[in-house]
Every structure is written in C-alpha cells, then in structure tokens.
Amino acid sequence: MLMPDFDFLFFAEVLVGGLLAGVMYSLVAIGFVLIYKTSHVLNFAQGSMVLLAALTFVSLLERGVPFWASLLLSLAVMVLLGLAVERTVLRPLVNKPPITLFMATLGLSYVIEGVAQLVWGTQVHGLDLGIDDKPFEVAGILISKFDLVAAGIAAAMVALLTGFFRYTRIGLAFRAAADDQLAAFAVGLRLPRIWAATWVAAGVVSLVAGLLWGARLGVQFSLSFVVLKALPVLVLGGFDSILGAIVGGLLIGAGEKLSEVYIGPFFGGGIESWFAYVIALMFLLVRPAGLFGRKLVEKA
Amino acid sequence: MTSTSALSLKRAPAGATAETSEFGRKELRTFPEAASSEPLRLESITLAFGGVTALKDINLAVAPGEIRAIIGPNGAGKSSLLNVISGIYRPQHGLVWIDQQKFARVPTQKLARLGIARTFQNLALFKGLSVLENVVIGRAAVRHANFVEQIVGLGRARREQADAQRRAEEIIDFLDLRAVRNRWAGTLPYGLQKRVELARALVARPKILLLDEPMAGMTATEKQEMTRFVRAAREEFGTTVILIEHDIGIVMGLSDRVAVLDHGRKIADGPPAEVQANQAVIDAYIGVPHDDEPEDAYA
Amino acid sequence: MMNPNASRFPAWLGPVALLAVAYGVLPIVGSSYLFEAILTPFLALSLAAVGLNLLTGYAGQVSLGSAAFMAVGAFAAYNFNLRLPGLPLLMSLVLAGFVATALGVVFGLPSLRLRGFYLAVSTLAAQFFVQWALTKFSWFSNNNPSGVIDAPSLSIFGLSFDSSIGRYLFALTIVVVLAWLAQRLVNTQTGHNFIAVRDNELAAKVIGVPVLRTKLLAFAISSFVIGVAGALWAFAYLRTVEPAGFNLDRSFQVVFIIIIGGLASIRGAFFGAALLVVFPLILSRLGSFLLGDHFDSGVLDMTQHIVLGALIIFFLIAEPDGLVALWDRLKKRLLPIPNNP
Amino acid sequence: MKTIKLIPTVGRRFALSAALVITVAGTTFQTSADEQFFPLQSYRVGPYAAGGTGFFGGFIDYLNLINIRDGGVNGVKLTWAEGETQYEVERGVEVYERLKSHPGIAAWNPLSVGIAYAMIDRITQDKTPLITVNHGRTDSTDGAVFPYVFPLLLNPYSETSAIINYIGAKVGGLDRLKGKKIVVLYHGSPYGKETIPIYELLAQKYGFTVQQIEVPHPGNEQESQWLTIRRAKPEYVVLRGWGVMNPVAIKTAQKVGFPADHIVGNVWSNSEEDVIPAGDAAKGYVAITTQASGSQYPVLQEIIKTVYGAGKGNLEDKNRIGSVYHNLGIVNGILNVEAVRVAQEKFGHHTLSGDEVRWGFEHLKLDPARVEALGAKNLFHSINVTWDNHEGDGYVTFQQWDGKKWNVVSDWIAPDWALLRPIIEKSANAYAAEHKIPLRTADEAERVDTKPIVANK
C-alpha cells in the first residue's frame, strides 16, 4: 500500500463525514428536546412522527399534489397530530410520573406507525428534494452538498428555535413551563396550550427531519428507526438542551464514525450499532446530566 | 444574641440532664454512654448551593432526650440543616458529630445504624406497601438475611421477620394505627400518613429522631395528637427529637429548646420563653413578608 | 357461572384449580396448535414479564433491554448443553440463568448513578451490544454459518419432553416454579426493599435499605428469570433461534405485557402475556372469517398495531394497574367477600 | 385525478379495520376432495412488506392463473390461505401451527430465512416440503441430510460464485481477476455473514483480494464504511444488503464518488424497493437475479389478461406487475405447480400428500424447452432438482437499473457448482452428525408416504 500508517486526510474525511452525519442525528434529537423541555416527556413516538410526516408528504406528492401544497398539507397533518396527542394522551396523563408518559409514547408510536401505513400503504418511496448529492472536493476531502444543506437547515432551525425561546412571548412561556410547571401554572400560563404548542413544534421538526432523512434513506418503515440514532445523542447532550442536541449529535456522529473506522476492525467491524450508546453511557457515568442538561437527573 | 447561642451550646449537656431526668429508661440499658454525652453536635456548618449560602457557620449541640425545635421563616435553611444531618447534603465546611464520631458528610446509607431516623416534609411513605409493611421496613437497617434465606423462610430470616413484625405491631398500637394497619399507605388521609411515617421512624428505636414539619397541613386536632405522640415517643423510648415546625404555638409548647434560623444563620437558641422574647427573632419574623404556608401568627 | 357464595372458598383454591387445569385438563383436551402456538409462547413470555416486572414493576428500574437477556439465556443454555456433554438439561438452564444474571449486573451498574430515562436509554446499550456480540462471534452459535442455534431434545432424568404436550409441560413446570418463587420473593423483606427503592429512594436509603445492593439484586434476579425465559423461548417454543429474534421489538413486547397486565404484579405478567399472545390471533381469525378471501392481512396487522398501541395508552390512562386490577374488580363484584390472593 | 382514488382506499381500509375490531368469530377449514393447499406465511406489513406483497402477490397470481385458465392442475384446484408474519419468526411458527393440519398441503413457502429455519424440524416431521427459493440454508441443498428442504434455483454459495463469475466476465475473464480488489459490504446479521468464507475461498482461487466490511443493522448510516471503501479503491463492491441498507449504500456510494455500475447487488439487494429510494444515484447499479423482471413474458401477459382482467389480481398497485419480487413469486408459483404436476403424473390426479409433492420436487426438471412452453422463456432459465441436489442448478442473470426499470445485461450464468458441492456436503454432514440424522439414500428418496401426516398432538 502506498498509504502511510496514519492517513491524515482520511482521518479528516471520516471526521467531517461523521460531523455531518451527526447533524442528521441532531435533527431528530431536537424534536425530543422540544417536548422534553416543556413537558418532561421522553417522546419515543418521535421516530414514528418522522415516518408519518415523510410518508404523508411523499404520498401526496406521488398523487400529483404540488410540492408546496404537499408540504403545507403534511404540516397540517403534523399540527393536527400534535393537538390530538395533547388532548388524548397528555392531558389525561397529567401529573403521572414521567415514565408513565414515556410508556404512553411507546404506545403512541405504535398507533402512529399503524395509521401511517394503513393510510399510505407500505411501499417504499424515493424522495427527491432536488438537492444534489454529488460530492465535491475541498482540500482533498469529499463533501456532500446534501449534507451541507442539511447542516444549514439544522443550523437555521436551531437559530429559529433559540430565537423563539428567547424573544417571543410564547417562547418565554415555554421556558417558564420548562423551569417550573407549578410556577408557570401559578402565573396563569395555560399548560395544556403550551404542551399542544410544543407537540406541534415537534411535529414540524419531525417533518423537516423526515424530509431530509427520507431523501437519504427513502421513505419507508425504517425511517422510524432513526430514533435509535437520536437517543445516545440526547443522553450525551442532555434531554433538555437544544444546544446539547447539536453538540451531542456532532460528538456522537464523529465518535461513531471514527471508532468504526479505527477501533471497529479490532472487533471485526459493525460496532456502530451500540458504540454510540457506550460513548454516551461512559459519559453519563461521569456526568449524569449530560453535557448541557440540568443536573436534576433524579427528577426523571 | 449570638453570644447566647454560643453560651447555650456550651451549657447544653448540663441543661439537658436536668431537663430530661426521667427519660430513656429502656435505652439507658442498651446505650449506657449515650446519656452521658451529646448524641449530636454540629460544628460550624456552612452549606452553599452555587453562589447561594443556605447555612452559615451553624453550631448546634443537642442534648440527650431533649426535644429541640428548629424554626425560622421560609428559606431560613431549616430543611437544609436536617438534610446536612442526614447526609443528603454535604456541607462545604464544618463537621457533624454523631455519638462521638465525626463526619464531614454523614453517610446517609448508614444513618439508621448510627441511630438516626427521620421523616420528610413531603410525605415519603412507600405507596406500594401497606401501613404495616411500611413500618416493618423501618427495621431494614438491622436485617441481615439474604433473599434466598428470606424466600425459603428459615432460621435467621424468619427470626428477623418475626422480630420486625412484633416491633412494628407494637409501634402501630402505640401510635393508634391499628385500624388502618392493612390499608395501602398511599390511600390514607394526609394526617395519618404523617403518623405512619413517624411509626416507620420509631420502629428502628432511633436515638435521634429528625422530624421535618411533622404537623404541616394538619388540622388542629391532628396537631394535638401528633404533639402527644412525639412527647410519648420521647417518654417511652428516650428518643432525642429534633423537629422543624411552622406552628410556633405548638413548637413553644412541645420543645425543650428552640433554635431559630434566619437567612442561614442561627439567630437564637434557648428555652422557648427566652427565644420568644428575643428581639432578633421578632424582627426576623416580621421582616419576612408573607409565607404562603398556613402559619399561626407569632406571639 | 360463579357461585355468589364462592367467598367461602379458601385462597389457595384458585391457584390449585388453575394448576389442575393446566396439568390435568389441558393436556387431554388441547390440540397441538394450542400448545405450540399459544400456550408455550405464552408461558415463555409470561416468565420474561415476571422477570421484568420484578425489575421495573417492583424495583422501579425501567429496562428496555429484556430481549438481550432472553438472548443471553437462550444462547448460554445452548452452549452449556453443547459444550458440557452430560450436563443435565435443567442444569444448563440454571447456568444460563446465571450467565444472564452476570450480564444483568454489569448492565445494571449504570442504575447506581442513573435514573429514569437515562437508565432506560442505557439499557438499550445492552440490547444492541448483546445482539451484535451474538451475531459477531460465531462461537456462540457453534460456528453455524447462519448464526442459528437448534435446541437440543428436551429430556430430564431420561424422560423425554419432545412432543408438543411435553414441551408445554416442561415450560409450564419451570414457569410455575419460578413464578412461585417470585411471588414469595415480592412478599419478603427483599421484595419490600424493591418497592421502597421504587417509591422513594431517598427515604429507603435513610431507613437503611441498602439501595445500591437492592438495585443490583433486582437486576440480577430479574435477569436470571428473563434469561431462563429466553432459554424456554428457544428450547421449548421455537426450537431454533437467531439473535435477530431477540430484537428491540421483543423488549418492547415484554414492557407492554407488564403495562397491560399490571405493574408490580406477578399475576399481571400472565394476564398481559395472555392478551398479547392471544389478541393478534383472535383479530386475525376475525379478519379471515369476516372478509374471507378478500381479506388483506396487511390491513389486519396495521389494525392490530393501532389497537395494541391504543390499548397501552388506554391502560395507562384508565387502568394504570392493568388487567389484574380489572380482574380483581370483576371478581369483587362477583364474589361479595373477595379472597385475597 | 389520482387523489380521488385515495379516499375510497383509505375509507375501505378503515372500514375493514373497523369491521375487524367489532366482530367475533373463528375459522373452520373447508375441505374438498380435489384441492391442493398452499399455506402462505406472508408478510404485507412491517419493514419488509414491499418484498412480501410482491412475492406473495406473484405467487397467488400464478395460482389464480392455473385455476382460472386450466381449472387447476389436472382438475385439482389450488387453494391457499394467508397468515401475516411481519417477517417475524414466532408469527411464522404460529401460522405454521395454525395451518399445518389443513388437508392437502403441497408445500410451505415462507420467503424468510428465520421462519424457514424454525420450520425445518417441524416440516421434516410432517413430511411436507419447505421451499426457500433463492435463499435459505445453503447446506439444505444436500437432499441426503435435508429431505424436505428445497433452496430452489439459488443458494447463497452459488450466488457468491455467480457474482464472482460475472465480475470475472466484466474484467475480461476469470483469470484477469488476479490482483484485483473486491469489497463485500454485508449486512450485520447471520445472513450477511454466511458467505464470508466463500468469498475468501474464491479470492484464493482466482487471486484477487477481498475486503469484507460489515454494516450494522439496519444500515441507515454507512458513512464510515464507504469512506473506507473509497480509501481501499476496489474494482467492484458487492452489496450483500437487506432492507434499507441497500438504498443507503447506493446513495452513500454516490456521496463518496464510487460509480454505481461497479456495485453488484445480491438477491436481497436486487429489487425495485432497493433502488427507487436511492433515486438517480442508483442509475447503473447492477444486481444478480434468477428471474428477469418485466411483464413482456407470455406467462405474465396471461396473468394480466386472465387474472387481473377478471379483477382477481393480487397486487394493489398494477405498476408493480413484472417487478422483481412479483416475478420471483410467479417463478416460485411455476416451480410449485410443476412439482405438483410431476408428482401427479406418478401418484394420480388427485390431492397429494406432502411427501408425494416432495417426490415431485425431487423430480422437477424444467429444461429451457419446457420453460418456454410454460410461457416463461427468458423469465428464468431452467431447473433440474434431484433427490440429493435440492437447489436444482439454477442459472442467474444480471440486471441493471436505468432509473426506471431493470434491464438484463448478461447471459444466463452458471455458478461453479462443482467447487461448492464438497463444502456444502461437509456442512450438511456436520449438521447430520450433530443432530444424529442418518443420511438418506437414493432408494429411500423413492419411498413415499402417500398418507398425509397431520401431527395434531
């Protein structure tokens, strides 16, 4: 082989690839964070929401509905879903322990997956967003335009959400609810409305994630597996930090790819499926609230 | 006023023996040295969360068998103090002496074996257990049989279970809980739950009992009952009691001595009458705008 | 149907009658379909749920990795049986349980520092790691190129249990024994310690419940039971398993069983498993009956998916204590003075 | 407007769904003297639903064709019942247990490795054939050890050999493989790993280097694997994928600039569902197949005319007629029906026992002339199953995706059966030893149980 022992360029390439892959994980993780922040629920149904959003969009598109109309209709579906979830699942379960709510979202994910496939069928769809995925080279490192767009969208979304939380009235209400539900209630914030709003927001985020992941994987049942990629990100970044979701995503993405390439061969490869969890776990043992999470792990 | 508290600190053992001459008949046999020394002493405890100081240089000596109240406005640091004693918080500075042993942080897991039991401000019963089971489990610290022995139910496991059961029944009778002994703990009215918690603490026959607002949210009758039980517990078992309570009327009637905290500092410490007349205490209470907890007016 | 004076019956009558039916009546009247497709998987899943209920229902530690411990039990039993010739079958099962226990303790270690969701997510690490390891190292499957293991024939003391009834009785006996032990356990001090740690960890710690030891013990015992359940799944039910059979869906299935059946109830595990095993079959029978040839098994399955998910939400909202609570209430209505189990 | 169609579909589905929930019932098996029954462990939902609907749709379409056009096989009606498995083993077992006592079972066709494995013991006891067309356990090719299991047309080892033969042809002959580099990207599962030793063996034999890289299940992230491939600069990449791993592989290949026409997919990476989600990235991608796709073959035309014309077509989406899985289902139908026909010639034109159908499969010889007579010329090549060769020397071809459909780009290629046979026998014998199975002889294979064996207890 012509390569030297350590190929820096290759390392950099894996690193960049990993970071960009991490952005994709973050996209899903942000949806979790939104809901966790305000209602302290780990929403396992996030994956099925991603599936539903993407499937709705692509099915409408294939039935001849124009792009923007499809997007709006899918958005409407996600909004309705968010409202319905608040009404039928969250509200009756208010004041139940968080773990009960978590299990309810497990059930919810079954319902959403079932309905999505019942309505739209189980076929596999391709999804072309018109973003070219051909690579171009920067200083010898291949970079995919699609990934850059995804990263851009993720960045925009984070900026948007941060701005929203920081500067809008309802955003501040969100934060208040996140900080102290009782207090928020006391000053007259209507929690159900806030929850409904967060679920709607999470639905919108899952539409974005669904489109990007769908363009990457094709729109099919496996889309709901993306939650499994997002969970270690959340653990690492903290369940309630949007910044954590981004940084966690980057770290997990990079760590996972580098370890697969450099550590994987010692185990015969294929360690990606669990390695992210191990990274996250190790980290947790040192810092039980994740990178940016609040230190009240006990609450959960 | 600080001088008084320092004084009282030094005076404590002597005062205690005088006040509690008739307590602890049973326990004296088991722990002969306990009566002769302070069961608990705090030595310049300072505790802060982030930048906020919760406790500042607190000294407190507890005499054997006394009922010692800790009062103060909301946020004065009373609960923090109890949490330092039970090892839930680790103070930045200072020592906790329990029975001649000193701790920078009290090991919570060993608390029961150190002879300390406590109740919690917000109910901390095990909702999934019956009243009786809640009380029985109070003996956890002195049980050693492993789970296999327990499943088989022979020898040590059976003896321990029988012993715990017997003691629990005694306490249940003692605290008038017989009527509800088989109910789920979580289904009882609030006042009764507080009493069950007291039972769970007492069944361990602690030398020191820490009560965190044992009467909060109770009706007047319930408070009277509770007062009676706390007193009876001291008479019967010779337990030293440290309690936080908001109802000043009750505190003054029940306790031998009262320590007052304000903004993390101890501003007074002494017999109820003395504390009641203390200007700093009066100021502290008036200075505090308004508690949202129901609280009898001071004085 | 039920005698209103039934309250005169002693408490042991119910379980004894049930055992009499299970051992005496079913083997005579049951068909092979009943044993192979319903009862045996029902027993194995019930046992797994008993195990998880000890950990999650009683000790309050949420685990999403049950299937991993089932897999460990199955593959360990297979390997003990394969590599230690002459080892009695029961011994392989017990040893397999211990291997699962060891792994359970290792993956239970995070519980000493983590709670709630963080712990739940960390148990996923067990799920993925075990599946990976079993696939990766073909030693575990005796270098079978397909990674599939075949169960040995079931015989104890020269008695063969290889017919469908035999396998059923084999599973039944193991499940009865372990469930009985579990039932005893939850009524001992240790069982109460589990509940104490679940209900209020701090209070438990203060009164001297050894919290850390209790948590690890819960992981250990639970993993043992789940491991044996996995071995039953492999040996008595499917008779050939691949690591992929113990995937995340299986873990969720066990979680669903205890939610629907009733958390912190040994009986609940059986109720929940019965529902989860029988419900899809009823639905599919319904489907083919109603719609005959035109019936689309896809629609049916989607429906099942939706109904299952909705059931879970329903139970969490309306009956958090699960089927067991419903059953008890029903019994109470039918028998004026209930005999408490 | 196409949207209009959507509403009734959704409505119907929900109506069905609602109907299911509210009614109560049970089933009984209706029996009739001259029926041959096919129990179908189908999967129409879940992650692999696309393959399941295609395959079982094709299979049912062909059975329907025989019933409608010919009135069955020599007057014996073909019947079937479906049980949904979601590709899950225990549900497959449940369906097996449910349907196994149905009279007149011809053969089981699960199209799932896991379910097939779980059934080997059971169907051997029942003496009913288990067909694992194109997949399954390689060593079950050896009929001496596995009398009732038939990995028809292509087992995984033959697939491996055929792929290497194809790549050899592309580089200008097998001898030109020397010094070349091939990467095998395999799914992180027992299925994925099964062919590792065969690639090693062939690499040794032909002197090329092979690097085998695992993709963890489900395979929706392959960045690191493809960067490694990019660094390795192989001539060809063999994709031994599954489900979502396939389109992601193709997309990621494009991302790292690896040309799609140098990726060769195996039989689980060769369907429309594997390439459509990859969009344009899949243009030029090549995959192995035992049956060509497209609907131009006479048998498909007849199915369209006779079955779909009568409104009895099984595929909801008619565009999928002639797709890879649909055609595989049809070929599978041909093989099953012809095995029944062969057996009927020997045992009579009536409902046969499972063991009689087994005999039929063991004498299933369809030469190209017969295949043409069946209207399947160029759909598949030929098959010649014997008592000890249960694969039947299937030929394969390679197809290339042009962005819309698959086009055949090679002749019919034969795997190197002679090379593989000893390895297969060795593995089969080891299995026989471990399970204490006596090896069957040619004479024993001729002994046939004419009574159906219904193990009901």
Image (cartoon, coloured by chain):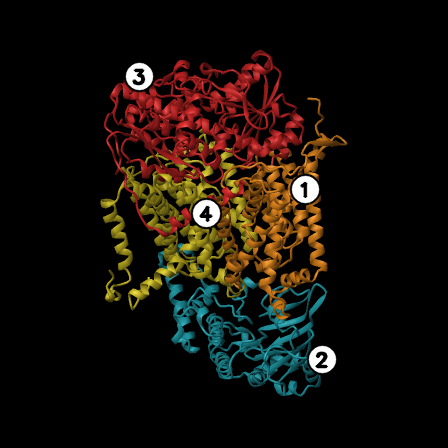
Chain colours: A orange, B cyan, C yellow, D red
Tell me the CA gap for discs 1 and 2.
65 Å
Residue at the farthest right position: A139
Three-letter code, disc 3: Ala
Q: Which residue is the site of mark 1?
A: A150
Three-letter code, disc 4: Gly
Relative to residue D306, is residue B250 depicted above or below? below
Circles 4, 1 touching at the beta carbon (< 8 Å): no
Q: Which mark is residue D254?
A: none
Mark 4 — on which chain does it sit? D
Can you give x and y, in whole percent of width and height, for residue D280 in the image? Answer: 62, 30
Neighbours of disc 2 within 10 Å: few (<14), some (14-19), many (20+): few
Secondary structure under the numbered disc 1 in the rendered image: helix
Mark 1 — on which chain does it sit? A
Q: Which residue is the site of mark 3?
A: D442
Neighbours of disc 4 within 10 Å: few (<14), some (14-19), many (20+): few
Q: Nearer the viewer, mark 4 or mark 2?
A: 4
Tell me the CA gap for discs 4 and 2.
81 Å
Q: At 53% from the left edge and 64% from the top edge, which residue is drawn?
A: A95
Q: Which residue is the site of mark 4?
A: D11
Q: Is residue C247 left or right of residue D348?
A: right
Circles 1, 2 touching at the beta carbon (< 8 Å): no
Q: Which residue is the site of mark 2?
A: B2
Secondary structure under the numbered disc 3 in the rendered image: helix
